[in-house]
Amino acid sequence: MRRWAARCSRVVWPRPPSLPWRSRRLSPARRATSTTIICSPCWRRPASATLTAVPGSRLQLKGDSLDQPAVQAFHRERFAAQGVTPDRLRFRGRDHTHEDHMAAYDEVDVALDTFPYSYGNTAFEALWMGVPVVTLAAERFAGRMGCSILNAAGLTEWVTHTPEAYEACAIGLASDPDALRRVRLGLRDQLLRSRLLDGRAYARHLERTYRQVWRRWCADAARHG
């Protein structure tokens, strides 16, 4: 994980602007988001409720196929069923370079982690670029990656456990430009100080886990001859 931060630092991603979108843009942005994930009704409902509750907010959907008119129409129809008008949605396809992909976070104020399948590398990228990530912790690995990353980064206030809490967290962030500005200016430094990017500590913890597993196996083998 430290290697990931070092690679980003060598590229010298510029510090994000203090608050790029006064229109409060939300995003479930992914480098490659499948239609199944984005269209999950269980995620679309709180995302739509957040848009409704925050005047002037817009939702940016980003993914490989989202520059295709038929796919855009598909999403507009489903969000319309939740009361979201087409002008509240913005679509962005795959960026041609990684630089453009990272720069896209300058257009986002809050990242809405998708569920039941959550962020992985996307959470790292969003946080590194100063964008808070709201996640809903599920029971299985595929739905807990965002939760694990936020916990390791010391950002537990953005981890929620019900759709209602997820919605409330997203609305609270999107409705507070001053808080978003503070987050944006300090988030990268917080990541660098956190155990999320402490590679040595991670390696030591993993080694201890391997030893515990091995000792448990040995003890079990001894009991059963």
Image (cartoon, rainbow, N blue to C red):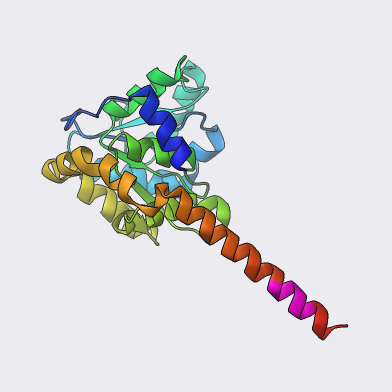
The residue that appears at 40% across and 55% down in the rendered structure is 152
Query: Quick check: 181 left or right of 149?
Result: left
Taking 89 as reference, is 155 above or below it? below
Viewer-proximal residue, 166 or 214? 214
- From where the camera sits, is residue 214 visible? yes
The residue that appears at 81% across and 85% down in the rendered structure is 223
The secondary structure that dominates the magenta segment is helix
Query: Quick check: 58 left or right of 138?
Result: left
Residue 42 image point, x, y percent: 46, 50
Residue 54, picture quadrant = top left
Residue 83 image point, x, y percent: 32, 39
Give the extent of the magenta segment. 215-220
Viewer-proximal residue, 144 or 78? 144
The residue that appears at 39% across and 57% down in the rendered structure is 151
Q: Return the residue found at the far bottom.
A: 223
Residue 225 image point, x, y percent: 88, 83
- From where the camera sits, is residue 54 visible? no
Residue 41 image point, x, y percent: 47, 46
The residue that appears at 28% across and 40% down in the rendered structure is 188
